[in-house]
Amino acid sequence: TSDVLISGGGIIGCACAYELAKRGARVTLLEYGKTGMQATNAAAGLLAPLGESGAPTAILRAGMRALREYPALVAELRERCGFDVELRDGILKVAFDEDESAALLRRFSWQRELGLTLDWLDGAMCRELEPRLSERVVAGVFSPQEAWVSNQLLALALERAARSYGAVIHERTPVARIRRRGGRIAGVAAGGEIYEAPVIVLAAGARSGQIAARMGIVLPVFPVRGQMVALGGMSAPIRHAVWGREGYLVPRANGLVFAGATVEHAGFRRRTTKAGVRAMRRMAATLVPQLAAATMPFEWAGLRPGTPDGMPFIGPIADTNVVAATGHYRNGILLGPLTGKLVAAGILDGDWSGVPDEFSPERLRAPIPSTA
Ligand code: GLY
C-alpha cells in the first residue's frame, strides 16, 4: 500500500513520482515496459512553447511557465543525481518563401508581446547565425530563450531522483487487472502482485484512454505517431535548434542531430516506415543541405498522447479517486515537470488552482458551448 499509485513511467509519471516523493508521499509507479522508453524517448527534447503554438492558448501560457521553471529543476536534479541533463537554448524558425514568411511574421507580431525575446531575421541574418542553413531560407525568427534538453537524460534523472526520495518504481509491470472496492478503484493487479493506494494517477501516455476505459472512465486519449532519425558522421553542422515547416533539427551534445517528427494517425503501430524516415531525411537536407551526406545511426518512433482539443488532461476525474496526468501530445517534455508539481499540489494540498480549466479532465464531458 502506498499513498499514491502511478500508472505509467514516462516523463509525466516520473515527474509526478519525483514531486510527490520529494514532498514525503509514499509513491509506487508501475511501468509496462521500461521507464522513459515510449513517447518520452521519441522526442527531440524541445522546450518550445512559442514554437508549438499557433494561438495564445492555455497550453502556451502553461508552457511559458514551464520553460521559466526549467533551469531550477535542472540544477535541482544535477544536485540530486550528479549528472547534467544538457539544457541548451536558442531556436531558429525559418521560412522558405513569401507565404511561409508572412505566416511567420503574423506569429512573430503577437508572440513578441508575450515577454520572451524574439528577433526577426532576413535570410542573410539567418545564415549568419547558422552558416550551413540552406541558401533558400528567406527569413526567420530567432528565439534565444526557448530551449531543449536531453529528454532521455531528463527522464532518467527524474526516475533516479524519485527513487532517491523513496519512490518505488516497477518496470515491465503491465496492469493485469483493475481492483474495485465500494465504487472506487482500490488498486491494480500487476506482475503477480496487488498494488493499492487511495489515489491513482493515470499517466500512461497514449495508452491512458485504454486503461481509463478499464476503470470505467471515458478519457479520449489517442496515439499520434512521430518518427525521428538521428543523423551523424560529421561535426555537428548547426549550433541551435532549427525549425522549418516540415519539422525540426536539434543538435545534441554527443554530436548527433535529431530530426523529427512525423505526425501520423497509425493506431498503436510504433515502428518507423520507409516513407516516414525518407520524409525526415528530406526535411533535414532541405533545412541544412550538408545533412544529405550524413550517416543515419538510428531511427525510431513513438506514440504521442493526443486529445481531441490538443490540451492535456490534468486533475481529478469526478466521482473517482483517479487523477489524470496525460494527453500532453507534442508538449510532454516541456510540460512534464510542471505537471508533476501541479499533481503533487493537487493531491497533497488539495490545491488544483494552478491547473487551467482548459486542462480539466471534465471539459469533454460537458456539452460543447454554442458559438452562435
Ligand atoms: N514537440 C514536437 C513533436 O511532438 O513533434
Image (tube, helix red, strand yellow):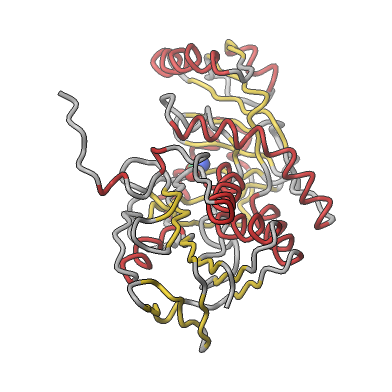
Q: Please state which of residues 285 and 28 is positioned toward the viewer in this rendering.
A: 28
Residue 238 against residue 204 in the figure, above or below? above
Estimate the x, y position of residue 238 in percent, counting from the top left: 69, 32
Apparent side of residue 224 relative to residue 280 in the rendered image (left or right) = left
Apparent side of residue 69 relative to residue 246 in the rendered image (left or right) = right
Apparent side of residue 185 relative to residue 5 in the rendered image (left or right) = left
Name the residue at 51% across, 77% down.
Answer: 196
Residue 273: in sight, yes or no? yes
Residue found at the very far left of the displayed protein: 372
Name the residue at 57% across, 19% down.
Answer: 135
Estimate the x, y position of residue 210 in percent, counting from the top left: 34, 66
Quarter in which the N terminus is drawn: bottom right
Residue 44 against residue 218 in the figure, above or below? above
Residue 299: in sight, yes or no? no
Name the residue at 74% across, 64% down.
Answer: 165
Quarter in which the C terminus is drawn: top left
Q: Quadrant of residue 168?
A: bottom right
